[in-house]
Amino acid sequence: MTEQFGESHEGIAGAVLAGGDEPKPVYLDFGSGTDSGAETGEWWAYDGRSGRPRAAAFRAACACGWRGEPYPIDWQELTDGRRPDPDTGDAYRDWSEHIRGVERRTVPLPDELTYLMHALEDQLAALADQAPVAALRAATALQRLTADIAQEAAYAIQEDEVPWDRIGTALGLTPDRAESLLTHYLLRQ
């Protein structure tokens, strides 16, 4: 699950153990060479096989640390074939509500700017279909422009000595991600 805030608010249907604890992420080896595995905390990886604990429930889990309500897993229903997977829609809805809360706490953009950004996105998408090289040229120019403006904004924020948690909330990011973003623009040459 991802939304407009990227890795700061990536969400999963995470595992919950019988006692209510969240298990440590497990490493899944897909066996096709180096770096052929992945680490996950998703409910399905905790099925009791290969020495992993069995999840008693799943819940929405966001990269920012937020957690939703747990929903029980009926393993009997899953193993006898009555259901291939539990319906994780409730966890997705919980996470979506969390994202709406994050959005409500961000600094609002002027309506005119929001309109212009949507219009620009539509025009660039159409241009990418009709003239991809021209779309790439426009996107490159836009990237330079936004990077220059972001650098100016980062210097102004640094001068104002705004705390990282306030910057993160205003941007819809974790404080660490906000600091990383500002540092990226401050150090940009």
Image: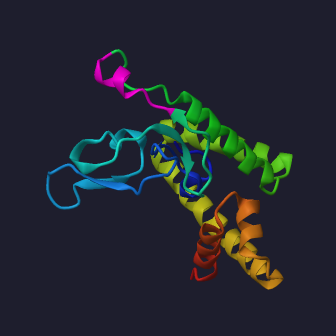
Looking at the image, the residue that sits furthest to the top is 82
Q: Kindly indicate the quadrant of the structure image that contains residue 153.
A: bottom right
Q: Residue at the location (50% across, 36% down)?
A: 130
**Residue 183: x %, y % from top left:** 61, 79
> Percent position (x, y) of residue 113?
80, 50
Residue 136 percent coordinates (x, y): 50, 52
Residue at the (71%, 60%) spot, across then down: 171
Q: Nearer the viewer, residue 29 or 169?
A: 29
Residue 122 seen anywhere in this rendered image of the structure: no
Q: How many marks?
A: 0
Look at the image and give the residue range highlighted in magenta.
Answer: 72-81
Could you tell whether 55 is left or right of 138 in the image?
Answer: left
Location of the C terminus by quadrant is bottom right
Q: Is residue 116 left or right of residue 125?
A: right
Q: Which of 113 and 128 is in front in this view?
A: 113
**Does the rendering let one see residue 108?**
yes
Q: In this view, does 89 lie above or below 120?
A: above
In this figure, which colouring scheme has been used for the structure? rainbow
Indicate the position of residue 39 as horizontal and vertical percent values.
34, 55
Task: Indicate whether residue 34 is drawn in magenta.
Answer: no
126, 188: nearer the viewer: 188
Left or right, residue 150 beside residue 105: left
Identify the residue at image location x=29%, y=24%. Answer: 79
Please determine whether, in this image, residue 116 is positioned above or below residue 33.
above
